[in-house]
Image (spheres, rainbow, N blue to C red):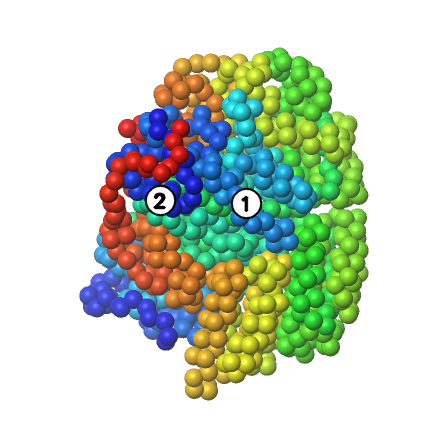
Amino acid sequence: MDTLKVRDAKDVEAVVRAAIAGEQPLEIIGHGSKRLIGQPMATNALLDLSALNAVTSYEPNELIITVQAGAPLADVQSLIDSRNQQFAFEPVDTAPLLGAPNVGTVGGMIGAGLAGPRRIRAGGARDHLLGAHGVSGFGDSFKAGGRVVKNVTGYDLCKLLAGSWGTLAVMTEVTLKVMPRPESERTLVLRGLNDVTANRAMTAALGSPFDVSGAAHLPNSALRADISELGGLGSTREAVTVLRLEGIAASAAHRAAALGKLLAPFGTAQIVEDAASAGIWSSVRDVLPFAAGGALGSWPVWRIVCPPASGGALGEQLARDTGGDVIYDWGGGLIWAALPQKPDAGAALVRQRVNAAGGHATLVRASDEVRRNVDVFHPQPAGIAGLSERVRQSFDPKSILNRGRMIRGSAA
Amino acid sequence: MAIMMPVPDQAVLNRRETIVAALRAIVPGEGVIDSPAEMAPYESDGLMAYRQPPMVVVLPDTTEQVSQVLKYCFEQGIKVVPRGSGTSLSGGALPLADGVLLGLGKFKRIREIDFDNRVVVTEPGVTNLAISQAVAHAGYYYAPDPSSQIACSIGGNVAENSGGVHCLKYGMTTNNVLGCEIVLITGEVIRVGGKSAETSGYDLMGIITGSEGLLGVITEITVRILQKPETARALMVGFAEVEAAGECVARIIGAGIIPGGMEMMDKPAIHAAEAFVHAGYPLDVEALLIIELDGPGIEVDELIKRVEAIAQGCGSTTCQISNSETERNLFWAGRKAAFPAVGRISPDYLCMDGTIPRGKLPEALARIRDLSAKYDLRVANVFHAGDGNLHPLILYDANKPGEMERAEAFGADILRACVELGGVLTGEHGVGIEKRDLMPEMFSEIDLNQQQRLKCAFDAQGLLNPGKVFPTLHRCAELGRMHVHGGKLAFPELPRF
């Protein structure tokens, strides 16, 4: 495998143009932290962006930061944290789940577009990407969007780049919206609810005016090890439902009390504050119960997105019928499912159930062999699939960039 | 007309009667309008300086009819201009002489209210405000609130990615829509997204939103609804200098406070508004900020104190804080009536819509002042200061020869200045025809070609709303051509591993 470590956008253009001429597809990587997600690719050259790692500009008062795509996410997060700011969509650190060494780069974060618990309130990666520079599969540098929050000039190409897994363009620089970090947080913990009831409790909380910024449920599980995986919430033998409130201390406390009253029919809520609360949410965000190093580390993991109010029933049945384990985020709208090993990772059953619920499922963790035989990304109806392929070709007609990563059978 | 539209296709115009008959076979009764008198209301949208009667108006009321109309137009090579309520301020719904004007006004039904999933599924002709009204009994509302919300349609909002006063905190349309049913020019009906937080695969909803009617015709939309904040209070703060007001905006944001709305008006706008609505605006200040905080009462009270202190630190000369809904609404009354108020002091005005980085507000204002002197035209400024979105209102008299052209040139210079200051041509009104020819100020030919290739993926023959957004139309085949540069994977100078 040839690794081409580019130094600037011009290098990227040159590499992509040569790849076009040589009809050689390229695999685009930053730190390679998410290489195990997607259909296995048949490339023999890596375009390595990790040297494009500069922070171009950071303007806290403008709520924006512009960084090169290969900038380490951990460093950028420390930088904005030092000014009490954050990426409000809580990017998922997939390293524990995949057993990768680190959280990866900013470009990878956008390309994967995996948002954490606060997505229900603050939106996803796509909502925070204001602008990007990249090189298309034509070998041309282009820009999308701008450096201001409010912009409707031309098509919003940033939306397409977020979550496109490097199949449309090689992003070289991105401008992201940053938001103030809340001054304090409170988490309400309810115990012992079954999945469907927990889903109802989360629905009630999210339908309240208390501005809930996280709503997750972890069923009791005999499968997971009894570790301190949830910020010290205790035994996994008891289900926990957690609801987060953020803001200035007085407001978070006031809303926590009000929400506790609203949820009284579901039991008495324990209230966890600040650092302990943050620990719970980073565990949920990074799916630590299914970590590669944990008891279920060898099981395939699905990421299911569905209408939130139907999540409880969908997940509960899926866990029961497969003998697997699930956890819920986004008030039921996101289900992480670890299923026992099977040649198809349970794809047939998962997809049938998820389709019926109006959702979609991505196989986030599985062996190369399984991923070769299963659609990693949710198969789409013909109309959308056709349109999406035309959209892809409008950026990369020769399929030079991450060829075949999103569509099974298109790697050849 | 300063803007050149595509040359009408005489062959299509010659077939007008056949076309009208064919459309009547698809949309029966009064759904096809071809008499000049009845078509008159469709000649223009909110950009009223531009008028053009369409070849024919079609008002379908089912997705199936939309699909058949588009399929017919596709097969016959007829251009189509979609239209919602016709409130576009950038000419997005300006008809074409040889085009079908496809109005979605009959799609007026809210199809489903789903409180458990916190979404509303609606037809595109429903007004923005009607969605909020339909869910108000349960404490919900639809957040984006363009000032035309009483009239503008949700379909038009999606097409334009509309904003509003509250998008600093709650986002634009794109951040509040989850899915749609869209009919492509071929007649193919596609469903994108739904009640889930994210779509699978590429984010097509994201690219459809703000595509200004160039990619498809939307026939159903799923929007996210939110619970109304417990309370809202506003501060009205006056400054002797625009720079101080700009500094105040920056410090509020820098202190980690995101107000529900943060608006600025300059002296001419303050005076026009006060004369119109008598809101009690101070008349001896150069800039007025209206800052609204919303949320739980306990939080709002605390943030009001913090904002007041910041304003004092920036040298505010007056500061009033609302203590009732009546007072809060009074603070807003002048701002919300700013456009008609300016309409009273000038026969005509042009409303611009650039965005700049917040920190450049004073510089932008200074440039606008200079340009005002250069073009000898008055200007009143209202801004969504929180997100740097400027709405300079250029005052002119269309009856005076040359004034409209001068006003347009002034406006174009303002937008060029926005781009130079690190901003963009349009924050919420769209490109349409109004800013079409300024696109090269912001985008290179390569950038624009990439956007047009995307258009080709949806509409390879360029039949949907041609003449809007892009200054130069290219054939899709030409855009798709790949220029192969020689050489294999051979970069001796690159580090390898």
Label 1 sits on residue? A55
The residue nearer to you, when weighing A78 against B431, is: A78
Q: Residue at x 61, y 54 (%)?
A: A62
Q: Is residue B199 visible?
A: no
Q: Residues within 10 Å of mark 1 (few under 14, many from 20)?
A: some
Residue at the spot 59% in from the left edge and 49% down from the top edge: A58
Instruction: Name the amino acid type tagged 1.
Output: Val
**Where the N terminus of chain A falls, by quadrant?**
top left
Residue B277, numbered circle: none
- Locate residue B415, reporting x and y percent: 49, 67
- What is the x, y in percent for residue B286? 69, 74
Q: Quadrant of the C terminus of chain A?
A: top left
Quarter holding residue B99: bottom left
Q: From where the camera sits, is residue A116 visible?
A: yes
The residue under label 2 is which amino acid type? Glu
| Image x and y of residue B464, in percent | 33, 57
Which chain hosts label 1? A
What subunit carries mark 2?
A
Residue B161 rendering spot, x and y as whole percentages: 49, 55
Above/below status of A382 relative to B184: above
* Count of numbered circles on the image: 2
Mark 1 element type: strand
Q: Is residue B197 left or right of residue B463?
A: right
Relative to residue A9, is residue A130 drawn left or right? right
B230 vs A238: above or below: below
The answer to which quarter of the image holds residue A328 is top right
Q: Which residue is mark 2?
A: A13
Q: Specify whether B82 is left or right of B272.
A: left
